[in-house]
Image: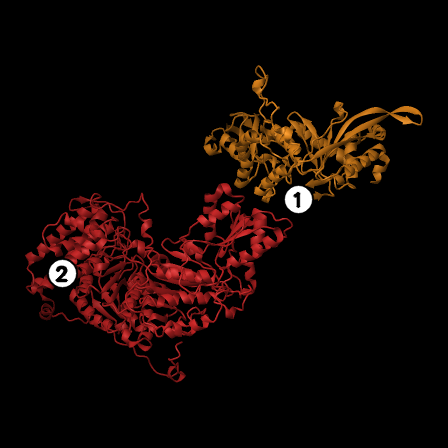
Amino acid sequence: MPRQGQSVETCQITAWKKHKGDPVDAGETICEVETDKAAFEVETPESGVLLATFFPEGADVPVLTAIAVVGAPDEDGEDLRPARGESPPAAGKGATVAEGAHAPTVAAESDADAGPATAPVPPNSEGRCKASPRALGTAAANGIDILALSGSGPGGRIIERDVLAALATASDAPVTDVTGPLRRSSPGLITMTPADVPGAPAREIPVERIRKVIADRMLQSLQTTAQFTLTGAASAESMLAYRRRLKGETDETLRRITINDIVHFAVIKVLKEFGNLNSLFLGDRILQYNRVNLGFAVDTPRGLMVPVISDAETLSLRELSQAADRLREACVDGRAAPDDLKGGTFTVSNLGNLGVEAFTPVLNPPQVAILGVGVIRPRPIAVNADTQFAQFMSLSLTVNHQAVDGAPAARFLKALSETLGNLDGIWAM
Amino acid sequence: MPKSIIIDPQDVRQPGTLSLSEIPINRYKPNPKREVKQFGHRKLKNMYRDMVLIREFESMLNEIKTQGRYHGIEYDHQGPAHLSIGQEAAVVGLCVNLDIDDFIFGSHRSHGEIIAKCLSAIDKLSGRKLMAVMEGYMDGRALRIVETERTNGAVKDLAVDFILFGTLAEIFGRENGFNKGMGGSMHAFFAPFGSMPNNAIVGGSADIATGAALFKRVNRRPGIVIANIGDSAACCGPTWEAMTFAAMDQYRTLWDPEIGGAPPILFNFINNFYGMGGQPLGETMGVGVLARIGAGVNADALHAERVDGYDPLAVADAVVRKRELLVAGRGPVLLDTVTYRFSGHSPSDASSYRQKEEIELWERHDGLTRFGRYLAANNIATAAALEKVQQWAVAKVRKSLSLASSLTHSPRIDTTTDAIGELMFSNGSVDRMLKGKPRVLMSKSRNPRVQAIAKKSRSAFDADGEPLPKARVVAFRDALFEALLHRFYKDSSMIAYGEENRDWGGAFGVYRGLTECLPYHRLFNAPISEAAIAGTAVGYALAGGRVVAELMYCDFMGRAGDEIFNQMAKWQAMSAKVLSMPLVLRVSVGSKYGAQHSQDWSSLLAHIPGLKVMFPATPYDAKGMMNLALRGTDPVVFFESQRLYDIGETIVEGGVPEDYYEVSEGEPSRVREGQDLTIVTIGATLYKALEAADVLAQSYGLAAEVMDTRFINPLNYERIVDSVRKTGKVVLASDACERGSFLHTMASNITQLAFDELDGPPVVVGSRNWITPPAEMESAFFPQKEWILDAIHERLLPLPGHLVTTAQATDDIVLRNQQGV
């Protein structure tokens, strides 16, 4: 099982493309595998006969474990079968021990008064929760959800002080704590269980892999940050005109530039002046960046993915468009490398093509801002005494109030609207 | 060094020729008439009997090892059996004229010596005394076994059974053996009859026996001491060190004549011409006649002579003559006792290194057969009587085998309990190892050092808490001095020696003031012979005296490796606590003197079972721990950091108490209280940890708890674990090199004892795995305050705004280990 990126511990075999006894050529795909972030094809490095496969489809296999043997027809590959200890269930548990061990705790203790915690480094970005035994014990004793915490210890380890900080935040909160309504056992609130829904469900879908990551990250985002959303709108006339012009170009790469690419380009340019939004919030400090690693949301068959265009401020519009295309396709095909999905400093999410007017994008901590792009629609505008219609794009900017106040966020949104509203200026930026 | 001895260039630059003393070779002239008169028929017959019994005993073991049976008794003996078939005349001749008070120490091939010495003692003791010894020995455990098959009423006959059984049960590793089976074949001995420890290390007995002789001399105990060592021991360094130590001029030039001269030690080389398969004569040495080496040691040539060990009467004659010299304090003596073993080195030895013809030549000279013929020829015993002796010996040996091989009669020690663990330490607390008034030269109050200390502050600070100049405080070295002085004035048996111990006052001034109040025999300069310093101290202690030996630098322990690791550490348990080891080995840990003078090897000692290892870091602990060590009965390696000798007490309020006190054994001390993290140190690193704790408090608002381990073994982890449970974080630091450091043992134990409370892995900060560089570069080698802070920041608790200046992250662990540094 090849290692698909530095932090990958296990991969799931999704389909065998070759079977025992099949002849294979070097470079041919023998199976497809998937991590919690992306799907890959595993190729045989040598030609020969597939002598044995060691794991069924669906098995979660530690990386660098033998999964199949290719050899001469008269050879037997069974002697290379991994020992029992390396079998997928055990290894799978070992690799995700923190999740397995603490999921029940979270469920059982989520009634408790778990307040939001400071959020320096995302803990579960690799699907693992690194926490000291002491932090685990303190969290359990105080009803703190360890998975919602971020670690300030070496290598992002959650240590006792992270739990204590969370606890302090929780207990410092005023009596009219916003977490109040979250207390499911509070009088007047009814706790609902599946048993309350008559009949069997149509489908039962395990929450795992990408879904699990999304579930954890989004919950953590909402629980551990003070996010709020500003909405606005930008005139889209200039963008649409420019886009029409590009459509007429002979160069395919220019024709492929989309409105979304133009929005990305504008965001990157405007962020140059707004380092406070191109930042990471680490609880005790805020890191501002000059470089822009732009994340953008992609809807894939597996769920939401956010690939990152690194050093996007160095790219031309065309290069930006090409990079986005490549990443989007990789995500949809499940081929994105884990390293393509890390390190974002600002995120753009576009639901406009699905007709959404405006929405509240959910932050991707420790990033401090995310831009939601809505539909382009004609809006009435007053021109002298006349009412005319012009195309407008709605914009929603969610920021973490822990790091960014309303006014600077509004100024960013205004600058972005103006840039998008008249693209002529962008080429000078 | 003594001022009284002038080295005059006129003398030492004189031309001349050195003539060596003559060394007699096999000069004994047999004379049956004289011999019968001298020994009497009974004694001569007994000598034959003893030789036959030893031969039968060893032959039985040979059959057991090679065939698994002897006269119908089957037994599988898994352990060693180094047999002395052929050497009986040498050992019976040696022992016949020895007193019970005379000690013999031996080698791995010493079954015959045990039997010969004990039979000699049985012959000299009354029945009542014999019964008292047998009944008193380990609650009569061995006696009760042999009594079950008592064949007649004679106590002496019973005593023979007792000796054979006790030795054989020991060889077979049984609990009713002489040492509960803990010594086995190579270490068996029976002290009440003067058969002292036999040693599996070649030459190992040379310095130990010398120390026992020193004990006899210093404490004016009767008897001489014999080191029975093989011819190959003549090429072992420690043997030479022992001979040099035993031959020091000072016994006659400087010591009070009343003490009686040199230690009564006889180095008896039982020369069977083989060291395993190597032949010292003609192959592995160049000395020719082994007795020649005496000429290299002193002007008396150690009164050396070669004796024919195939004639028991020749050996007996030599021993009597040499014994007189030794008792008169004119030793040491060397005997080159020629003999031969028909059996191999061990049962695994196919004798591929010698010709069968050679064995046959020696069999024609066989001392046992010839002595039988001598008895018959001189009408001392008839052939029939001799044959009866042979039958008697078979019956005796068979009986002892039947009892010793039976698990019913002779069970092994219960290894499902911690019975062996209970034998490791004697854990005594004894004010005086010997009765009697300690010999001193003045009252304590007149001692100049005592008077000087009286003028100093007991604490490092004045009444206002301001630091005092070092010259005005009771320093670490003063604290040690007070502890030593206390015990010197209580325990008459206590002596101390090492390099530069007397006039110099110890290389680091600990003994200053002792020269004035102690006679030479209680405090003297040893030769620069670390093996002999440690080895003689082992012998002195196991003979019953308290001794403080000093190695000037920790690095010199390598020179005394066997003596510390195999002898000092092991004899209490190998003897099943028949022996105690009230020996404190002071070891100074250096700095500033580079790669061979600046190493903290406390971790090496931690690895050796059987040693107590102490390492105080404050004057208070230095005195309290030295007091503890000097009242104990166990071997203690007592580490002292040279960085600390001049410091005053900065931690314990009130400073170093004037009165006697002891620090509780094994208890680490909490030097500073805190709740945010724990720093545990060994040795002088304590002060670096305190500096780090200051920075943590001032710059990061963190309260570090600082603990000084003090004791490496035994060590009570409770306080440390309590602290770590409280703080969740622990850094361990010492001057020992990181790889294999005892700190890693502690870290592992802490992890296991407090895992659920840990907020990070225990972090070890040790010295680099390098040579110690010269003084100017030491801060790159020994742990510094910054290392501790950086390690905390990188591995345990990132410190906001902390600027890292040293490499303490985990990144380098793999790389450094790959590189072996």
Mark in front: 1 vs 2: 1
Rendered view: A168 above or below B431? above
As rendered, which of A385 and B817 lies closer to the eye?
A385
- Mark 2 packing: few (<14 Cα in 10 Å), some, or many (20+)? few
Query: Which chain appears orange?
Result: A
- Mark 1 is on which residue type? Asp
* SS at mark 2 in the image: loop
Q: Which mark identifies residue B126?
A: 2
Q: Residue B20 location, x and y as percent?
A: 29, 77
Q: Quadrant of residue B787?
A: bottom right
Q: Chain of mark 1?
A: A
Q: Residue B144 location, x and y as percent?
A: 17, 49
Query: Which chain appears red?
Result: B
Quarter containing the N terminus of chain A = top right
- Mark 1 packing: few (<14 Cα in 10 Å), some, or many (20+)? few
- Mark 2 is on which residue type? Ser
As rendered, which of B143 and B486 lies closer to the eye?
B486
Q: Quadrant of residue A196?
A: top right
Left or right: where B41 falls relative to B686: left
Q: Chain of mark 2?
A: B
Here the colouring is by chain
Q: Residue B744 location, x and y as percent?
A: 47, 50
Left or right: where B719 falls relative to B346: right
Q: Are marks 1 and 2 on the same chain?
A: no
As rendered, which of B157 and B293 lies closer to the eye?
B157
On the question of residue A62 being in view, the answer is no
Rendered view: B765 above or below B527? above
On the question of residue B716 being in view, the answer is yes
Q: Which mark identifies residue B3?
A: none
Q: Which mark identifies residue A284?
A: 1
